[in-house]
Amino acid sequence: MTSYGLKQRFSTVVVYVFLGVMAFLSIFPFLWMVIGATNTTSDIIKGKMSFGASLLVNVNTFLTQVDAPLVFWNSAKITIIATVLTLLISSLAGYGFEIFASRFREKLYTLMLLTLMIPFAALMIPLFMLMKQFGLINTHIAVVLPTVASAFIIFYFRQSTKAFPHELRDAARVDGLKEWQIFFLIYMPVMRSTYAAAFIIVFMTVWNSYLWPLIVLQSNDTKTITLVISSLGSAYYPDYGAVMIGTVLATIPTLFVFFAMQRQFVEGMLGSVK
Amino acid sequence: MSDVTLRDVRKSFGAVEIIKGVDLDIKSGEFVVFVGPSGCGKSTLLRMIAGLETITAGELEIGGERMNEVDPSQRGIAMVFQSYALYPHMTVRENMGFALRFAKLSKEEIRKQVDEAARILELEPLMDRKPKALSGGQRQRVAIGRAIVRHPKVFLFDEPLSNLDAELRVHMRIEIAKLHRDLGATIVYVTHDQVEAMTLADKIVVLRSGIVEQVGAPLELYDNPANLFVAGFIGSPKMNFLKGVVESGSAGRADVRLPDFGGAVVPVALKGDAPAAGTPVTLGIRPSQFADDGDAALPVTVDMMEHLGAETLIYARSAASDLVTIASPTRPNLQIGDALTAHFPSSGALLFGDDGKRIY
């Protein structure tokens, strides 16, 4: 084998070892979670890394301690409404920023991007006071509202809209479509993969959101799955088996959404940087 | 009635004026081609007729009605775009019938009109395919079909063949010419390809920097260009421009001396009086005008040759290194570096003044 061939083989080995380590680091928490769901609390604390026989016991404990249908329904309701509204409002804004020129467009856009630099911790108190004034504390609307105009998703849609062929809009105008019809009948279907990628990002963010729901959702009947899992884990004698079962169940919807839209997600991410 | 009239039409983007006052009359059924180099404003002018760009000043009439503020869909136009602009999520049938849905036609009527257009363009086997499953030529036919179904007063084509390969471009060019003959519609067509302009147009509008340089029939522009720009733009290979000085002149004739070509004197026939002796001028000679029996002669040296089969292009230089292109219908036995006396009939030479305008 030539020295060039050896070099090639060595670099391939290095790449694969690196990828293997990164893949393991990514998968390990999931593996630990699934194994933990089959073990007792003491086994989990001891760090046992093999499947146990306590799955049904843990499931039973979880279902006894938690009103699972209610908390999953709360999470699902909030996530689906917030995701649909975020995609609709942010994509409209992103489309508008890219398509319609005005004197103030770029200034306004820069101002909007600057809001990405404000940490959520700085917004919590004003947001809470705002929600309180509107009488929305302890309602799901209070969780949904602050997410629907997302600066990041607007940015993402504006960047993606750069790849949207402007001649399609011209053709639609000649065909007699109004601006809102062009958006709903041409832009949305054409940008399907961008929407799919944004759907996954927003869905996972809202489904996993913890801090803001913790602040505004105060009664048990409004709480989401992430809050409930957290409260299970912070009990005086936490049952980690039940926590793991809750975590596994809470992960399933995000995995389902990701795998269902994986192809469009990859296309969307590629489209956004072309 | 599908005349199109433009009166002092102007377009500005901010402080920059792109279209600087265009006056144009396009008769019903006429095939008019806007031609000019990149950035001359030809596509902007077409988009203004379509209603996709606002008109800053001036009047646009289609079929005798003022259209300046009318919505694109209400102007009685249909447009074919360079990139086809087919809706990628719709089938060919849906693409072609889409505008008719918004014109509130019944499903039966839409089907009938789409089928008729598909028959004319031989698209029947492709009706259920999506654009990504079509070739470039097929996509362009669908785009034309989408325009046909609307029965517009005026068809607008924006460089429709630019994305096609050379062979397909020739094929589609013939298709568009046939379509014009069959439909008898008014067509406004934008291209930067002067061969397309020459072969398709009833009337060519040559634009430069937002100004109409000349309007006329293709051969009129070829034979009688109004200025150096039109003379250089129309015709391929490009017309030769030779720097000269009027040596002497009288009514109907000017003797032009060409200092870069050994002081050769060419008698040029004029309709009017010749410019004063000593006036700097430019002599225009088409490459195809060079012939063995011409009365004028230029001493040159062969620099380069291109054998195209039907003709040979000889690129030659004068002693002062001025380039002359000669199109020979034969296959001359010449080598690079050979001295050559290029003859041409002086009656075919055109004279241009220092300002670039033709001296008649």
Image (spheres, rainbow, N blue to C red):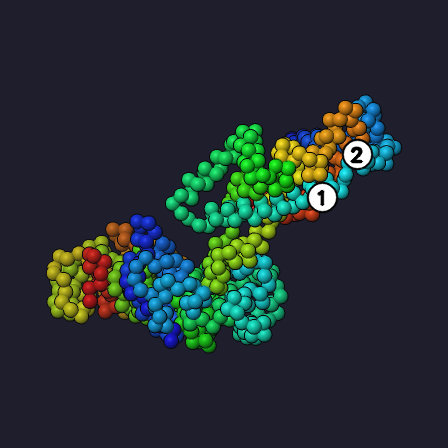
Which numbered tag is attached to residue B28? none
Determine whether A267 is above or below A169 in the image.
above
Q: Nearer the viewer, residue B221 or A81?
A: A81
Horizontal arrangement in the rendering, residue B356 relative to residue B118 (left or right): left
- Judged from this view, the residue extending furthest toward the right is A53
Above or below: residue A209 compared with residue B320:
above
Residue A166 seen in the current view: yes
- Pick the residue in front: B45 or B39: B45
Residue at which label 2 appears: A65
Give the chain of mark 2: A
Q: Earlier in the sequence, mark 2 or mark 1?
A: 2
Identified by mark 1, the residue type is Trp
> Regarding mark 2 in the picture, which secondary structure is present there?
helix
Which picture quadrant has residue B36?
A: bottom left
Q: Secondary structure under badge 1?
A: helix
Q: Measuring from the top left, give residue B247's x and y in whole percent.
A: 14, 60
Residue marked by disc 1: A73
What residue is at 74 percent from the left and 41 percent from the top? Answer: A70
Residue at screen point 61% across, 39% down: A143
Numbered label tally = 2
Q: Residue at x 50, y 68 (%)?
A: B103
Q: Residue at x 74, y 28 (%)?
A: A233
Image check: A26 left or right of B260?
right
Q: Mark 2 and 1 residues: CB-CB less than 8 Å, in contact?
A: no
Q: Is residue A139 left or right of residue B273?
A: right
Could you say which quadrant of the image residue B155 lies in? bottom left
Position of residue A242 measured from the top left corner of the image (x, y, whole percent): 79, 32
Query: Picture coordinates of residue B321 (x, y %)?
Result: 28, 51
- Looking at the rendered structure, the kind of residue marked 2 is Gln
